């Protein structure tokens, strides 16, 4: 059971030292540490009651808030009021003042009630504490408590946040011994105890201070305030009634004010209000009851004068319907009806729908005719179903014009309907907000997609798919299939590593199984991932026949056309498509899929233009980064997927790019999100639904090409090795093989590792190019990455190639780094302050470090011992890791790297036994075995 | 900024006394006022009373001899039935033209007063009386009704009768109304009004800077 503390404000009298009392409600004893804290604050503890000195009220109540205790409802209310007092102080609503009790004078910080909001909130607090407090009225106790808290808080600030040794004016003043009475007064305001003063000179100062502050505080707090009430008896009879609101918030008319003093104040305040609103004086026939005005004058009063009167402290009331925000008042209801016959699968966005609309004013429905009638009436207010409503003529005009236009058309296209749905809450875009959509027929499913209500059931994965799709991947596949049925392009934009490739492959396998596909699919991807695709197809859908249209020996037009009749998928690259687009345009493809679709982000490039012209039935874009820099990139991808959906580029710039990028219009951004939602599926690796589906660690291979230069060097080393090894024996042969293998591995990484003196420009390493692409995408997803390499020189090259002006310096931990520096690197990476990339040499960084801030691990080159690689991976994948760790192992296709990798995959156990000692086992291979291991498969060169 | 010209009846009030006392008495009275020697100035029906500090504390009383009781009642009735007039008095926008054709200029005309001071000085008006006369100007300027009260009008009667002719205009029912919100931004743009140093602050330390420093610390801006 926890200690429960109760508390109450017990005295507002300055002569009482203790203002607040606390006691424990249950039988528990107060802890010793708490007792000590209270005694430090001069709290008097006697028989379970704790009395807080008035001057320490804030500090003590703040201290109690830090304890692990239950606080009674009453005490919690006082604490909230204390916190309100502190906010009042932070607003600057205070001044240095004095209080008098008989012939005793106290210096005290006082509240400045000149802000209406502060006065009204205080009245709310008085009403909240409506019961008697310690036998006294809340009207007395609440303001007194607030005053005590404010004074206590400012003294606390002065005594805890100022240093007497600072150069501030206050510090100088406090170091100085006060001479005049007013200096003593200010000095007393800064002390941690009330100094009692008496005598004539303090009486005179009190008069002077009181006179000075009288113009600053809300003098009328204790009397009440004049308020104005706007009411209408009928269209032509509008009135501003004068009402007195007393300190309890009770409303009274003039006849109820019997006290002359109140009547005098009433008139005084009315005269003050008439300075802002002279009509009150000019039309005084019915003063002091009301002022008769016209509807137009009522409009001017409500829109322009009432806010000014509110700022000056007057209350202004009006019918609730006129006080509500204007946008909520006029709304529209839309009905869409679609029959099966109207769906045009070839151009779905142009399918026509029956369209009907009605308007809602206040809570009631209104026909277009009634809306037109009100518009023509041209009055600022209209009475609608018993309520007065304020009309915004600009929006009314737009709404009427829009409604008339739509009425004439009678039907809308699907594209228009999706726009309406997406933009329904966009106040700048729509003439009137759409309150509800009713839909019947196939269009309902579309609208559900806009509103993120995915109603479709995930399909079972195809039988020809070798592997198991995770449930979110199954959803991705089903979603692609659904959009295929509708004839709409789809952008699958999952985070890197979530398996966009296999979702597409499952989709294709499903379509093939169902017999929907009789023509090939065209895949366009960057050269760097072509190998990955090849491997993924072989692994997951081996039945799928593919042809890679790439390299200098690619097929001619005739051969190509013939070949496409025999395969399920043709794979090519963005660079080839630019050259061979005529060839591609001649084929009627089942579909076109773009991997790393951000390659067409610039809509004006030839590449993007020709890709848009390739004929097909279904278009798919796969990309983890649909927008790298500018919103226009999204338009380009959508223009490929569903041409015309986002309008022309010019329209898109005007309606989305400028409002979102330049004016930071969040409403428009939200509308755009809704608009693209049906065709856009993005799951983050941190989505709870995805995380629960993923293992703690995901390993994947990243297959890379050798560049031509790498391949030539590789061939030279292999040829030399095979020529020489036959002539050597024993230790010499072993030495030769080991040296050659080391050189081959280096060539796979970068030619500069074996030919350091040459100048390198452009992409000379396929692996490095792929690494750059991967890292760029990972950084954009907010990942933190460890990159391991076994070559120090390679580390330097990677560091240089990944360094950009936007990134902090990439740390590189290798054997030459001293311990102190190494610890600092680790601390910076772990504290997330440093670079999101950490480069490590496998030997220096592979063991002993805790780098759990990383969620991606990349093995740039392979160590042929899984245990060593796993140890390095475990720098991130260990206790303390909160995210899924993605491990990427980079392999150069067609090289010794791939051979060894395949051996490790096939015979994990055996290999680990053979190669656990390193690379010596290679030296034992026969010449033929060695040839098979190191020979380069030329077709896999870029 | 130019000083506001006093209302016509205040000018009359001042010239009434000024022309009946020597310049040096007038100047001494002015100095007494500037030194803050006036205490407990009170205007009641038909009279004005105050204490003036000096060698001793002197009691000053100025009585109005302008209107008969009957006149006063007549004027009270006129004012209480004329909302426009009453509004102008409260607004302090009343001008001489508004009253010139009204009976007794509605009480704003000044014909005669009787002033006494406990100093028993020579002449009609001593410097203490002048000091109180000058102090009364501030009261009249701030509230025109104070002059009419001095002239003997019962302001309580006026306010009590005001509106009685139009009581039917009071509209009360339990219809639902909502309070208009205070415009956004008014709180954010609030600037503490305590900055200027009080007139009695003669210390060499900047009052304004000290308060600014305290406010910054309260807001925890440093």
Image (spheres, coloured by chain):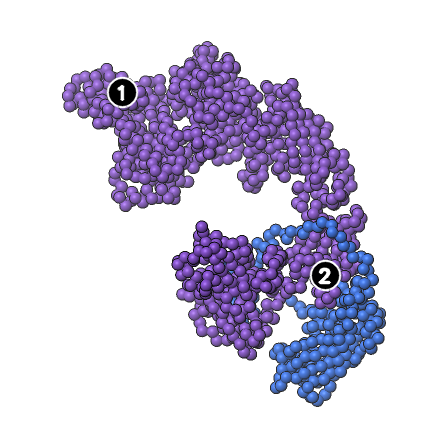
Chain colours: A purple, B blue
Q: Where is residue A760 shown, x and y percent of the image?
A: 33, 30
Residue at which label 1 appears: A934
Q: Which residue is mark 2?
A: A270
- Is residue A695 visible from the viewing direction of this image? yes
Q: Name the residue at 20% across, 20% down.
A: A924
* Residue A588 placement, left or right of A932: right
Q: What is the number of the mark on residue A498?
A: none
Q: Position of residue A859 (x, y in %)?
A: 33, 30
Q: Residue furthest left?
A: A730
Quarter holding residue A774? top left
What residue lies at 70% left-to-right and 62% top-to-bottom? A269
Front residue of A260/A761: it is: A260
Residue at 56% x, 66% y: name it.
A12
Q: Quadrant of residue A445?
A: top right
The residue lying at 76 percent from left, 64 percent from top is B87
Distance of label 2 from label 1 (alpha carbons): 100 Å
Chain for mark 1? A
| Disc 2 secondary structure class | helix
Q: Residue A221, image x and y in percent?
A: 64, 63
**Relative side of A835 to B200, left or right:** left
> Residue A390 at what x, y percent from top left?
71, 45
Secondary structure category for the residue under label 1: helix
């Amino acid at each position: 059971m926890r200690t429960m503390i109760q508390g109450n404000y017990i005295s507002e009298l300055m002569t009482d030292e203790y203002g607040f009392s606390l006691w424990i409600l249950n039988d528990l004893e107060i802890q010793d540490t708490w007792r000590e804290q209270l005694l430090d604050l001069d709290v008097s503890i006697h028989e379970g009651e704790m009395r807080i000195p008035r001057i320490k009220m804030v500090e003590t109540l703040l201290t109690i808030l830090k304890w692990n205790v239950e606080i009674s409802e009453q005490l919690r209310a006082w604490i909230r009021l204390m916190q309100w007092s502190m906010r009042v102080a932070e607003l600057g609503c205070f001044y240095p003042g004095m209080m008098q009790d008989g012939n005793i004078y106290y210096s005290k910080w006082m509240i400045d009630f000149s802000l209406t909001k502060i006065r009204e909130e205080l009245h709310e607090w008085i009403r909240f504490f409506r019961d008697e407090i310690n036998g006294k009225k809340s009207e007395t106790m609440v303001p007194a408590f607030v005053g005590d808290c404010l004074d206590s808080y400012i003294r606390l600030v002065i005594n805890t946040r100022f240093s007497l040794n600072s150069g501030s004016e206050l510090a100088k003043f406090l170091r100085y011994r006060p001479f005049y009475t007013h200096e003593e007064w200010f000095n007393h305001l800064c002390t941690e105890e009330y100094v009692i003063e008496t005598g004539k000179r303090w009486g005179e100062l009190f008069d002077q201070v009181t006179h000075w502050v009288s113009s600053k505080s809300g003098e009328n707090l204790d009397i009440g305030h004049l308020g104005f009430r706007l009411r209408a008896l009928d269209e032509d009879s509008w009135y501003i009634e004068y009402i007195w609101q007393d300190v309890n918030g009770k409303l009274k008319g003039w006849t109820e004010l019997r006290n002359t003093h109140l009547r005098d104040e009433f008139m005084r305040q009315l005269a003050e209000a008439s300075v802002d609103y002279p009509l009150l004086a000019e039309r005084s026939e019915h003063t002091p009851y009301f002022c008769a005005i016209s509807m137009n004058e009522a409009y001017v009063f409500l829109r322009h004068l009432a806010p000014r009167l509110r700022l000056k402290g007057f209350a202004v009331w009006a019918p609730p319907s006129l006080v509500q925000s204007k946008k909520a008042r006029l709304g529209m209801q839309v009905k869409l009806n679609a029959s099966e016959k109207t769906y045009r699968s070839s151009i779905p966005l142009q399918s026509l729908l029956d369209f009907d609309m009605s308007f809602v004013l206040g809570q009631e429905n209104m026909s277009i005719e009634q809306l037109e009638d009100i518009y023509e009436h041209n009055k600022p207010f209209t009475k609608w179903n018993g309520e007065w409503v304020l009309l915004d003529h600009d929006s009314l005009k737009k709404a009427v014009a829009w409604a008339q236009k739509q009425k004439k058309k009678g039907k809308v296209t699907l594209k228009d309907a999706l726009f309406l749905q997406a933009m329904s809450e966009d106040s700048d875009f729509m003439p009137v907000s759409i309150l509800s959509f009713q839909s019947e027929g196939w269009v309902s499913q579309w609208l559900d997609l806009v509103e993120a209500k995915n109603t479709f059931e995930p399909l079972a994965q195809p039988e020809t798919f070798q592997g198991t799709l995770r449930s979110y991947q199954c959803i991705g596949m089903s979603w692609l299939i659904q959009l295929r049925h509708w004839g709409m392009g789809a952008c699958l934009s999952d985070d890197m590593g979530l398996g966009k490739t296999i979702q597409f492959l499952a989709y294709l396998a499903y379509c093939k199984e169902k017999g929907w596909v009789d023509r090939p699919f065209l895949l366009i991807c960057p050269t760097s991932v072509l190998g990955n695709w090849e491997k993924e197809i072989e692994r997951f859908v081996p039945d799928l026949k593919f042809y890679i249209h790439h390299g200098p020996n690619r097929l001619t037009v005739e051969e190509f056309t013939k070949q496409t009749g025999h395969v399920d998928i043709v794979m090519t690259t963005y660079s080839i498509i630019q050259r061979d687009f005529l060839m591609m345009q001649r084929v009627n493809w089942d579909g076109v899929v773009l991997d790393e679709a951000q390659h067409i982000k610039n809509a004006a490039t030839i590449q993007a233009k020709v890709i848009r012209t390739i004929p097909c039935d279904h278009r798919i874009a796969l990309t983890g980064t649909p927008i790298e820099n500018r919103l226009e990139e999204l338009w380009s991808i959508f223009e490929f997927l569903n041409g015309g959906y986002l309008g022309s580029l010019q329209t898109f710039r005007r309606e989305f790019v400028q409002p979102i990028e330049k004016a930071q219009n969040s409403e428009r951004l939200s509308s755009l999100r809704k608009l693209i939602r049906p065709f856009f599926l993005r799951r983050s690796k941190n989505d709870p639904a995805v995380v629960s589906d993923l293992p703690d660690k995901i390993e994947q291979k990243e297959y890379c090409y050798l560049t031509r230069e790498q391949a030539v060097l590789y061939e030279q080393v292999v040829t030399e090795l095979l020529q020489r090894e036959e002539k050597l024996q024993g230790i010499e042969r072993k030495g030769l093989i080991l040296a050659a293998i080391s050189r081959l591995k280096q060539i796979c990484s970068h030619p500069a590792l074996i030919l350091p003196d040459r100048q390198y420009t452009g992409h000379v390493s396929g692996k490095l190019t792929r690494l750059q692409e991967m890292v760029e995408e990972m950084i954009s997803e907010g990942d933190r990455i460890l990159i391991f390499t076994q070559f120090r020189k390679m580390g330097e090259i990677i560091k240089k190639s990944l360094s950009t002006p936007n990134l902090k310096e990439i740390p590189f931990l290798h054997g030459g780094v001293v311990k102190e520096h190494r610890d600092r690197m680790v601390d910076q990476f772990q504290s997330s302050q440093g670079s999101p990339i950490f480069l490590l040499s496998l030997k220096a960084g592979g063991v002993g470090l805790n780098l759990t801030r990383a969620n991606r691990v990349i093995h740039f080159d392979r160590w042929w011992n899984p245990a060593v690689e796993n140890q390095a991976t475990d720098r991130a994948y260990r206790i303390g890791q909160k995210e899924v760790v993605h491990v990427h192992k980079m392999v150069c296709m067609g090289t010794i790297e791939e051979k060894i990798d395949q051996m490790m995959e096939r015979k994990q156990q055996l290999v680990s036994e053979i190669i656990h000692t390193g690379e010596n086992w290679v030296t034992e291979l026969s010449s033929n075995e060695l040839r098979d291991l190191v020979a380069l498969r030329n077709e896999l060169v870029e | 900024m130019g000083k506001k010209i006093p209302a016509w009846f205040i000018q009359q009030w001042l010239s009434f006394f000024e022309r009946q006392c020597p310049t040096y008495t007038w100047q001494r009275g002015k100095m007494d006022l500037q030194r803050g020697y006036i205490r407990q100035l009170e205007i009641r029906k038909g009279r004005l009373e105050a204490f003036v500090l000096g060698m001793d504390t002197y009691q000053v009383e100025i009585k109005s001899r302008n209107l008969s009781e009957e006149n006063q009642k007549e004027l009270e009735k006129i004012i209480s039935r004329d909302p426009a007039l009453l509004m102008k008095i409260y607004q302090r926008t009343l001008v001489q033209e508004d009253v010139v054709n009204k009976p007794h200029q509605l009480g704003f005309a000044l014909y005669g007063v009787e002033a006494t001071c406990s100093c028993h000085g020579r002449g009609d008006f001593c410097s203490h009386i002048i000091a109180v006369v000058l102090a009364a100007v501030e009261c009249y300027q701030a509230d025109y009704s104070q002059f009419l009260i001095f002239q003997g009008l019962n302001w309580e009667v006026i306010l009590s009768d005001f509106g009685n002719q139009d009581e039917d205009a009071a509209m009360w029912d339990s219809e639902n109304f909502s309070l208009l919100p205070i415009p956004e931004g008014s709180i954010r743009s609030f600037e503490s009004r305590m900055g200027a140093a009080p007139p009695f602050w003669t210390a060499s330390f900047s009052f304004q800077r000290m308060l600014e420093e305290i406010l910054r610390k309260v807001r925890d801006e440093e």
